[in-house]
Amino acid sequence: MKKFFLFCLFGVVLVAPGLAWSDLDSGLVAYYTFEGNANDQSGNGNDGTVHGSVDYVSGIAGQAAHIDSTDEYISIWDTEGVNNNINTSDGSISVWIKIDERYSGKSSFVFQYFSSHQDRLYLDAGDWHDSGKKLNIGVGASRFWTSGTVPDGEWHHVVVTWSASGTINVFIDGEFDTEDTFNNPDFSFQGEEFFYLGRGWAGNPGKFSGSIDNLRIYNRSLTSLEVKQLYNRATGGDGNYSEADLHHARSEGYWEGYNRALEEMSGCATFNDSNSTLHIPCFSFGAATYWLDLRLISTSPVHLELTDFGEN
């Protein structure tokens, strides 16, 4: 009854708790869960090849690939590969990592795409140049450090997005960390060049020591809201959305009916960032007025869970 009531109020989708995630498969061209193998779960057939004695250990969800030497790595594709849908000047890579140890003064590649020093994309967890547990990202001929740190021995979510405009963004644990530019505007992530997990190209293999899980490759740039959704999904929804996220969802066009809620908010509603709850104490419906508590549990598109309501 409550669910039907809110349909009448907003005309938006309501679902039970935990089932409201939007479709994050749009633009997903490769997806690796590492459940005992490196098979592509996206349906595009971009299976990886395991080299050496890669182990499978407990991951952020299910199993993860554990790599601990330069002889242990996964080639997602190489120059002989034929890969579906992976030729993009706009893209994203989402990955969960747990670093065992870092090697002083050396690279430690979580992943590396390499065609040349002018045409590359990598995530490096090496402890060089006094990085202080930060990550180094390279794209085209440019490279830069994250602002935040990624401590060893803990699971962390890292997302790298890039665009044809020459902008690259990095997110750590669901939150925006760093934006930079790269000086090769013709850079395009190709499915016909080397792409490795746990090491780099032969000239600088850069041993990685740790676990890798839930690697997603997209042929589009994810939004900050989608990044937060990926993080919240893997952590069981422990992260909260803020009122700013709700307003940003409107600007992204995720919910056409948002304007109605915005009108209600401008009159009397408040948003509690600590629990992602929109409280509307003065909603008019016919001759009666009601109070509503709605929890924001997804933003692209917007989904609200009705937690409680009553008549004033």
Image (cartoon, helix red, strand yellow):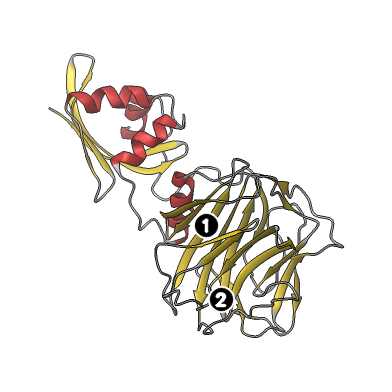
Residue 215 image position (x, y, % from top left): 60, 62
Which one is earlier in the sequence, the residue at label 2 or at label 1? 1
Q: Residues within 10 Å of mark 2 (few under 14, many from 20)?
A: many
Q: Quick one: SS at disc 1? A: strand
The Cα atoms of the two marked residues, 2 and 1, are separated by 16 Å
Residue 302 image position (x, y, % from top left): 42, 36
Q: Quadrant of the C terminus?
A: top left
Q: Quadrant of the N terminus?
A: top left
Between 243 and 260, which is closer to the camera in this rendering? Answer: 243
Q: Quick one: SS at disc 2? A: strand
Residue 68 image position (x, y, % from top left): 62, 84
| Label at residue 261 | none
- Residue 20 visible in this rendered orientation of the protein: no
- Residue at 34% x, 47% y is 241
The kind of residue on which mark 1 rests is Val
Considering only vertical position in the picture, is 30 above or below 286? below
- In the rendered structure, the answer to whether residue 52 lies left or right of residue 79 reads left
- In the rendered structure, the answer to whether residue 116 lies left or right of residue 129 reads right
Between 13 and 79, which is closer to the camera in this rendering? Answer: 79
- In the rendered structure, the answer to whether residue 229 lies left or right of residue 190 reads left
The kind of residue on which mark 2 rests is Ser
| Label at residue 159 | 1
- Residue at 38% x, 48% y is 17
User: Which residue bears the numbered disc 2?
Assistant: 211
- Residue 293 visible in this rendered orientation of the protein: yes
- Residue at 77% x, 55% y is 191
- Residue at 55% x, 43% y is 23
Quarter-wise, where is residue 166 in the image? top right
Quarter-wise, where is residue 243 in the image? top left
Q: Residues within 10 Å of mark 1 (few under 14, many from 20)?
A: many
